[in-house]
Image (cartoon, rainbow, N blue to C red):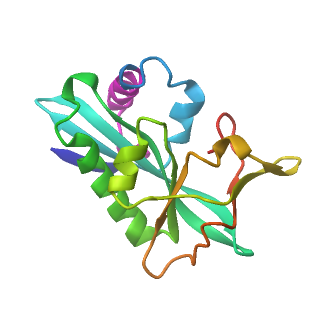
Amino acid sequence: MLRTLPTADLTAAERAVVRQMLDLAFAGNFGDADWDHCLGGLHVVAVERDEVVAHAAVVQRSFLHAERAWRCGYVEAVAVHPRWRGQGFAAAVMAEAERIVDHGYDLGALAASASGRGLYLRRGWLPWQGHTFTLSPTGPRRTAEDDDGTFVRVVPGGADLHLTGTLTCDWRDGDVW
């Protein structure tokens, strides 16, 4: 069963269960800042036999590209419980996340790990080929370390993306991308 709900509709117990699954799925490499980044938007949660088996979140961010600001549906915390991998749950939560992005935002974006690249490429996400920046508290800052892991989704009628141009994300604590 797939559920889509805003953070505000997750009970404290449900938030704890999702966080626990993310900690397990990311093998301890999912910190408090990562958790904070996926709050405040919409959560796509796959449940099988009363167990949370997969998760993705879509949060709104502001991106600068081609001399204007764009509403970005940023995909966060895509994960599948280790016991449930290889059964299509990542594709299921991503399909719903993509529907949300396509119908509510000017573009989609995400930061892909090396192990996640194949999933996003197969689903039509495009690797960003230009330079990435963040609008930090002290002004624009180059984020060269994020160039290779940044992926975008073209939204019909949305942003006119120039994949070799610059893409600037809003600031946040922890990983900005």
Q: What secondary structure prevails in the magenta region?
A: helix
Q: Nearer the viewer, residue 69 or 17?
A: 69
Range drawn in magenta:
6-23
Q: Position of residue 89 (x, y in %)?
A: 22, 41
Q: Is residue 19 magenta?
A: yes
Q: Residue at x 51, y 50 (%)?
A: 110
Q: Nearer the viewer, residue 72 or 150?
A: 150
Rendered image quadrant of residue 145: top right
Q: Nearer the viewer, residue 171 or 114?
A: 114
Q: Residue at x 74, y 51 (%)?
A: 134
Q: Position of residue 149 (x, y in %)?
A: 56, 45
Q: Is residue 146 magenta?
A: no
- In the drawing, does residue 131 fall left or right of residue 42? right
Q: Position of residue 174 (x, y in %)?
A: 66, 33
Q: Nearer the viewer, residue 13 or 73?
A: 73
Asked if residue 6 shows in the view, the reply is no
- In the drawing, does residue 2 fall left or right of residue 37? left
Rendered image quadrant of residue 50: top left
Q: Residue at x 42, y 25 (%)?
A: 26
Q: Residue furthest top?
A: 28
